[in-house]
Amino acid sequence: MVTTRTLPREGAPNQFQRRWALDNPGGRILLVHGFGEHSGRYDHVAACLNDLGLDVSAFDLRGHGESGGKRVFVQRFQDYLEDTRYALEGVVRESRGEPIFLLGHSMGGQIAARFVQQYQPPLSGLILSSPAFGFAVQVPLWKALAGRFFSAVYPSLALPSGLDRDLLSHDPRVAKDLAIDPHAQLNATARWYTECLDVQPKLLEDAPGVKISLLCMLAGADEITRIEASRAFFKAAGSQDKQCLEYPGLYHEIFNELERDKVLADLCTWLGEHIPSTQG
């Protein structure tokens, strides 16, 4: 059963959290969602993880879903890391020593990877789904310059993201559901654009600093993020225990693709190999 709560925070927007709790979990996992979406889109992922024996938590990033803040606005990328730390602290408080994992999708993959690089938390593993280490479409120079100009003088200016929801999944229901989802966003903001863009080279430069167990799950036909950047990150990651799974022909949202059952099975197989209670 999923429970929700909204927690007030001093000096930061309120944080909306979801939890798919188990009484005696073999492990715990925190999910970090992507751009313009929210934690409510991960019910089916959480159900799979619950079946594996994992207690699942998620939260809406500031400016997303039911959390506070101007829509898809962030003053600095570091604020997303603070959101993640706040949520993870709650997971750790609930823990009785079980392994804890961090899973990030797309922009959430950016955030999760940067969080591990910067804070070196005592996690049992990092899972990245189509992480936004680079954008698939080259932004025209004039648009990039305009974005930087407005980021400096009008950072909260709403701008069209250019995201084509039909490129998220081959399942037509995904785009249709997002179109009527009151908590989904298509617009971005000028500061969001520059902050997410500027962190990308840092993620690749600091990849050797990721030393915990790592699973990268990449969409072979991703037209939202650049798979070459994710491959480079994986190759440079300092983890002794790392695995990269690529899914030829799949679009960006691999957990929402027509082949989602295969993807989720792979995720659960990897996690099962990293949870002592599920190992043979």
Image: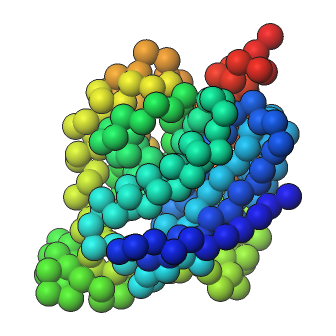
- Residue 48's spot in the image, x, y percent? 80, 44
Determine which quarter of the picture holds residue 207.
top left
Residue 56 visible in the current orientation: yes
Q: Is residue 50 left or right of residue 71?
A: right
> 130 and 156: which one is in front?
156
Residue 214 visible in the current orientation: no
* Residue in the picture at 44% in, 76% down: 13
> 21 and 252: which one is in front?
21
> 279 and 158: which one is in front?
279
Which part of the image, by quadrant, shows the N terminus?
A: bottom right
Determine which quarter of the picture holds residue 177.
bottom right
Here the colouring is rainbow
Q: Is residue 237 left or right of residue 150?
A: right
Which part of the image, by quadrant, shows the C terminus?
A: top right
- Residue 25's spot in the image, x, y percent? 77, 36
* Residue in the picture at 29% in, 27% down: 208
In the rendered picture of this protein, how many numbered marks are placed on residues?
0
* Residue in the picture at 35% in, 74% down: 11
> 112 and 88: which one is in front?
88
Q: Is residue 62 left or right of residue 203?
A: right
59 above or below 243? below
- Residue 220's spot in the image, x, y percent? 55, 43
* Residue in the picture at 25% in, 36% down: 206
- Residue 264's spot in the image, x, y percent? 74, 41
